[in-house]
């Protein structure tokens, strides 16, 4: 996997011949539009806190298209919202200090911090709950793929009919948030 450095102004550096710095978060799965929302928020994060962020993943949810998932250097997962990210993540050191840990530094109760609305620590699901959720997600993914195939076929059929009549098809693509 290749990594491309992202500057605070939103520009990337391609063909970098040196090693990448390790004290910056890795950003994954962001569209350019969401990245343009994330960069200003990341600029507001205190340097000490920014150094604690290992990775930020864009993980939109059904009810939140600005949802992000962070992995911190102290092995805590954090879920947040792009729009409120900077204001909340700057409190992370004091929040993390309050989490119960064992002698090795691992969380006594495995879970994650949810900063989407307030600040809540949520334990991870049991294996049975994870399996159940995974099965539901797989079924939903299959259903979505089937529906997309039907939609694609309908659009192709419509395009063929319009080609026959000489009309231009209108775009049905959804605009990205």
Image (tube, rainbow, N blue to C red):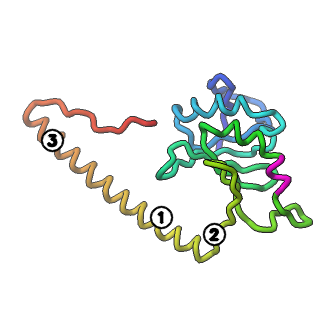
Helix, strand or loop under label 2:
loop
- Tell me which residue sits at (18%, 40%) in the image: 159
Looking at this rendering, what residue extends furthest in the right direction?
103
Mark seen at residue 137: 1
Is 68 in front, or is 81? 81
Q: Is residue 177 left or right of residue 29?
A: left
Q: Which residue is mark 2?
A: 125
Q: Earlier in the sequence, mark 1 or mark 2?
A: 2
Residue 126 in the image, given as x and y percentages of width and height: 64, 74
Instruction: Give the farthest residue toward the left.
Output: 165
Gap in Å between the C-alphas at discs 2 and 3? 49 Å
Span of residues in magenta = 94-98
Give the percent coordinates (x, y) of residue 156: 21, 45
- Please tell me which residue lies in front, 157 or 73: 73
Q: Picture quarter containing residue 104?
A: bottom right
Residue 55 placement: quadrant = top right
Decide if residue 24 is on the left or right side of residue 10.
right
Q: Nearer the viewer, residue 166 or 84?
A: 84
- Which structural element holds mark 3? helix
Q: Name the N-terminal-most of marks 2 and 3.
A: 2
Q: Which residue is mark 3?
A: 160
Residue 93 horizontal side relative to residue 11, left or right: right
Tell me the residue at 58%/33% (across/down).
35
Where's residue 38, x and y in %?
Answer: 61, 34
Q: Return the residue found at the far bottom.
A: 128
Mark 3 or mark 1: whose residue is earlier in sequence: 1
């Amino acid at each position: 996997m290749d990594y491309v450095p992202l500057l605070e102004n939103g520009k990337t550096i391609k063909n970098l011949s040196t090693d990448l710095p390790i004290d910056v978060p890795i950003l994954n799965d962001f569209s350019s539009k969401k990245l343009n929302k994330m960069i200003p928020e990341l600029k507001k994060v205190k340097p000490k806190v920014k150094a604690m962020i290992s990775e930020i993943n864009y993980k939109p949810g059904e009810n939140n298209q600005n949802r992000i998932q962070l992995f911190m250097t102290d092995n805590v997962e954090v879920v947040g919202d792009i729009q409120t990210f900077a204001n909340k993540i700057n409190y992370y050191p004091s929040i993390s200090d309050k989490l119960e840990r064992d002698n090795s530094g691992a969380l006594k109760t495995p879970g994650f911090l949810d900063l989407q609305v307030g600040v809540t620590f949520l334990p991870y699901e049991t294996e049975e709950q994870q399996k159940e959720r995974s099965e539901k997600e797989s079924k939903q993914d299959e259903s979505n793929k089937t529906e997309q195939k039907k939609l694609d076929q309908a659009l192709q059929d419509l395009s063929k009919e319009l080609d026959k009549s000489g009309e231009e098809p209108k775009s049905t693509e959804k605009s990205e948030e």
